[in-house]
Image (cartoon, rainbow, N blue to C red):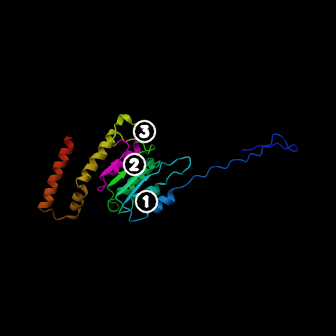
């Protein structure tokens, strides 16, 4: 910055130009293009986005990353995700016909509140494919986290449905849906195993 004095003008005048508002960068086109590649079964992003320089990712962009049927693994770390993003993810993953994702990781997103985590826990009631959902609190003590993490009740609900999915909940329920005439011996064995699992889970 340089200021000059002109004898022919008011000496209080300045050559300083008005600052133009900073233009924020949008990452959505790049991520939507990435989401549209059907052969990508795994996407791992740790963007560490600066909200003062980058626009908020749209709900549509986040949803598009989840909606590809062949996508198995999605990691979205430090992407400035918030509760509305969680709602978008929940809508994308609650339809079992359009997803086969088994692992979702949303660590280091400080704007996700209890409402966002609860939306994901509710989604798991209907989702049969997701087996792992990683949050900031997954491997650390709740008492050591000053920022976003699911409540103990919410995390317990998540773990309950994730455990059922790992045990084959989807296979059982879809088999029941497709078998209107009753099951055979193998199906009865499956039901017996499920009953034992539910009893064990309740006792724990």
Give the image quarter of residue 140.
Answer: top left
Secondary structure state at the residue bearing disc 3: loop
Residue topped by disc 2 = 106
Report, in whole angstroms, how far the alpha carbon at label 3 lies from the one at label 2.
14 Å
Residue drawn at (29%, 42%) of the image: 156
Question: Label 3 to label 1, Cα distance in Å?
Answer: 27 Å
Q: What residue is shown with label 3?
A: 147
Few, some or many residues within 10 Å of mark 3 (<14, 14–19, 20+): some
- For label 2, the SS is loop
- Farthest residue toward the left? 185
How far across and down, in percent of the image, does residue 103 sit? 33, 53
Mark 3 or 2, nearer chain start? 2
Part of the protein shown in magenta: 114-137
The answer to whether residue 111 is left or right of residue 194 is: right
Q: Secondary structure at mark 1?
A: helix
Mark 3 near mark 1, Cβ–Cβ under 8 Å?
no
The percent position of residue 202, horizontal first and vertical second, equals 21, 43
Q: Residue beneath label 1, please?
A: 64
Looking at the picture, how far across and down is residue 78, in whole percent? Answer: 45, 47
Residue positioned 22% across, 64% down in the render: 178
Q: Tell me the residue at 16%/52% (across/down).
A: 193
């Amino acid at each position: 910055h340089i200021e000059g004095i002109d004898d022919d003008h008011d000496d209080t005048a300045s050559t300083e130009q008005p600052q133009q508002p900073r233009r924020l960068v949008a990452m959505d086109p790049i991520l939507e293009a990435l989401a549209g590649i059907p052969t990508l079964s795994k996407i791992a992003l740790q963007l560490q986005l600066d909200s003062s320089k980058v626009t908020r990712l749209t709900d549509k962009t986040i949803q598009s990353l989840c909606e590809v049927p062949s996508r198995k693994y999605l990691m979205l770390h430090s992407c400035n995700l918030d509760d509305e993003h969680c709602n978008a993810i929940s809508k994308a993953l609650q339809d079992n016909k359009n997803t086969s994702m088994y692992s979702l990781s949303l660590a280091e997103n400080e704007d996700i509140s209890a409402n966002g985590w609860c939306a994901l826990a509710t989604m798991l009631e209907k989702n049969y494919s997701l087996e792992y959902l990683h949050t900031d609190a997954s491997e650390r003590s709740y008492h050591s986290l000053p920022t976003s993490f699911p409540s103990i009740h919410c995390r317990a609900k998540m773990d309950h449905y994730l455990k059922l999915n790992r045990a084959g909940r989807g296979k059982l329920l879809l088999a029941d849906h497709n078998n209107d005439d009753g099951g055979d011996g193998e199906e009865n064995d499956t039901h017996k195993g499920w009953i034992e699992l539910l009893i064990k889970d309740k006792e724990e």
